[in-house]
Every structure is written in C-alpha cells, then in structure tokens.
Amino acid sequence: MSLLRALATLMLATIALGASAQPKRSAAGLVSGEHVFALTQQYLATAPKRYVGSPGHLAAENFLKAHFQPEIAAGRFESDEFHPNTPIGQVTMRNYIVRYPGKKDGVIVLASHYETNYWLKDVNFVGANDGACTTALLIALGEYFRAHPPEGYSIWLVFDDGEEAIKEWSASDSLYGTRHLAAKWSGDGTLKKIKAFVLADMIGDKDLNVNREDNSSPALEAMLEQAAKDTGHSSSIFKYQQAVEDDHLPFRMRGVPVLDIIDMDYGPVSNNAPEGYHHTAQDTLDKVSPRSLQISADLFMQMIRLIDQH
C-alpha cells in the first residue's frame, strides 16, 4: 500500500506541476479580425464621409442603430444629443451608448469616435483607420457581449461624436463628445462607477504597433503590456512612445483610469505628408488589415479580462 500511495502522490504532484505550467487563459480569437474588417468595409460603403451635419453623418448614425436593434428593443441603447458651439456655430452632435450589464458593481467603457473631420469635407477623406475600423471593432465587441453577457464588470460601448476639430485642433475645438459626456457623467455620479475608460483609435494599420501613450494611466499601460504577452502580441506594442491628445483626456482630467490604444505611426512621412496617411485622402481601406484588427480585438478582449480581475 505504501508504494501505491507513493505513486498516487507522485501522480498528483505531476498533475499539479503540469497545471501550473499551463499558459494563462487568454481572450485571443474570441472576436474575429476578418469580421471587423468586413464591418469596416460595410461602414465605409454606407458612410464614407461622416463629417458633422452631412448626409454621411446621418448614414453613420443609422448604421449604428441598425446594428444595435436588439439593444434598442431592450432599452440598453442611449442617444445622447448635445449642441456645442463650434467655429461654424452651434451644431447638433450625438454620442451613442450601448450597455451590457455585468455581474460585478462597476463599468468598463470602450470608446471610439465615429465621424470624420469637418475641415476635410472637400477632400476625399474617408478615415478608414481613423474612426471607421474602430467603430467596426466596437460593433463586433457588442455582438460578442450580446451573445455572451459580461461575467465581470458591465461593458458600455461609447460611439462618440465630434472628436475631430471643426476648424483647427485646440482645447475648445476638439473632443466635443467626450468633453460633454465626461461632464454629464460627473454631474450624475456615473464617473464613480467607471473602472476603466479604454479608447480605440487608429488600430487597423497594416504595420500595427500600439504606442506607449503618456496620457494613459500607468496601471492600465502595464495591463496592456500583460494583455499583449498573454495573447502573443508583444511585438505589436510599445515600439514608440508619445503623449496623444485624444478622447480619453476629458475622463483622465476627472480622475478616471484611462487607456488610449492607438498607433500614431501611420504611413510614410514626407514634407507633403508630415503625419503619413493620417488626415489625408490616403487613409483608405487598403491601408487596414484583418490581421491588425485581430490583434486589436485580442488586446481589447484580454484587457477586459484583466480589468475584471482587479
């Protein structure tokens, strides 16, 4: 019996060792990059130019509503209309918030702007990487959480309007939607519920490498590094470092933990194109890849998993 007992003990120890050596569970592949790419293509075909007040902007809004009919029917889709003063006068803008209730007390906000620049309205600018693919990513994430309700914190998708400047980027002429929403949620107590505000911007670039972004919360930056390691995407992050003025800033200024998942190195730089393809007619669907959207989807899903653990 002592020999049998020793063998059983050895087997149990071996099993335990094997279990501890298993890789950490990751969310890689739960949302398809190919599907996000297809949604991007559909969005661009429906609303290629989406500047405020244009027919394309209305088409973009209708595209979102069409994809969230189940959430509209369930009362979990909010149209947040506001009327900011801009360099072209007072205009109507709308944020859209889609809610997926979780089992823990708290909210993870995932955000992207969905419009294009008003000042580029006379240029063939469609913003495939700058707004379109990230809108598609959030739609795909919503489809996932429709079928798989969150087990941890609630997930709120925010499709924000007016991220882009109307005339020229400044503190007053940019980030209209998130400035409005952060102020609104500060007033009604919602900000206290937000565990993390995670922003998607310009993450479909074929040559994807997500910035180490200096205006993001260090704890969430560290978590992103872990998420990349867990999903096998460490080579696709943190090659470059810079501070980016983006939709996370109004929430950061009010004390919310924020993370901007963004790749600012987009296309070759020249005298005629100092920011590469950014804000040019070259920001088209052929510059975006399903592989990069897969990496981005994996990072977002794993970030949710890691935030839920804290």
Image (cartoon, helix red, strand yellow):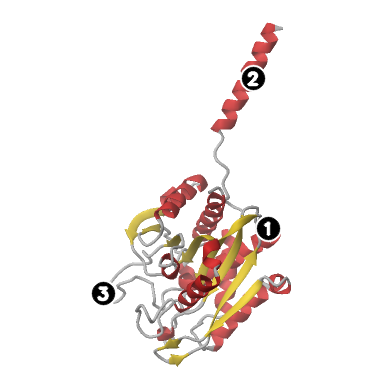
Q: Residue at x 63, y 67 (%)?
A: 99
- Helix, strand or loop status at disc 3: loop
Q: Is mark 1 on a helix, strand or loop?
A: loop
Residue 183, horizontal then vertical, whole percent: 48, 74
Q: Which residue is drawn at 65% across and 60% down?
A: 145
Residue mark closest to the camera, 2 vs 1? 1
Residue 111 image offset from top left, x and y in percent: 52, 67
Q: Which of marks 1 and 3 is nearer the N terminus?
A: 1
Whether residue 219 sits left or right of residue 80 in the image: it is left
Q: Determine which residue is flagged by label 2.
A: 11
Q: How far apart are marks 3 and 2 (CA)?
A: 67 Å
Q: Mark 3 points at which residue?
A: 271
Q: Position of residue 250 (x, y in %)?
A: 43, 70
The kind of secondary structure element at disc 2 is helix
Give whichever of 240, 97 is nearer the camera. 97
261 with respect to 3 (left or right): left
Q: Which badge, 3 or 2, is on the more N-terminal residue?
A: 2
Q: Which residue is drawn at 50% across and 71% down?
A: 186
Separation of marks 1 and 3 at Cα, in angstroms: 49 Å
Q: Is residue 137 visible?
A: yes
> In front: mark 3 or mark 2?
2
Does 185 appear above or below 93?
Answer: above
The quadrant in which the N terminus is found is: top right
Q: Which amino acid does label 1 sit on?
A: Pro
* Residue nearer the viewer, 285 or 93: 93
What residue sits right under mark 1 in the picture? Answer: 149
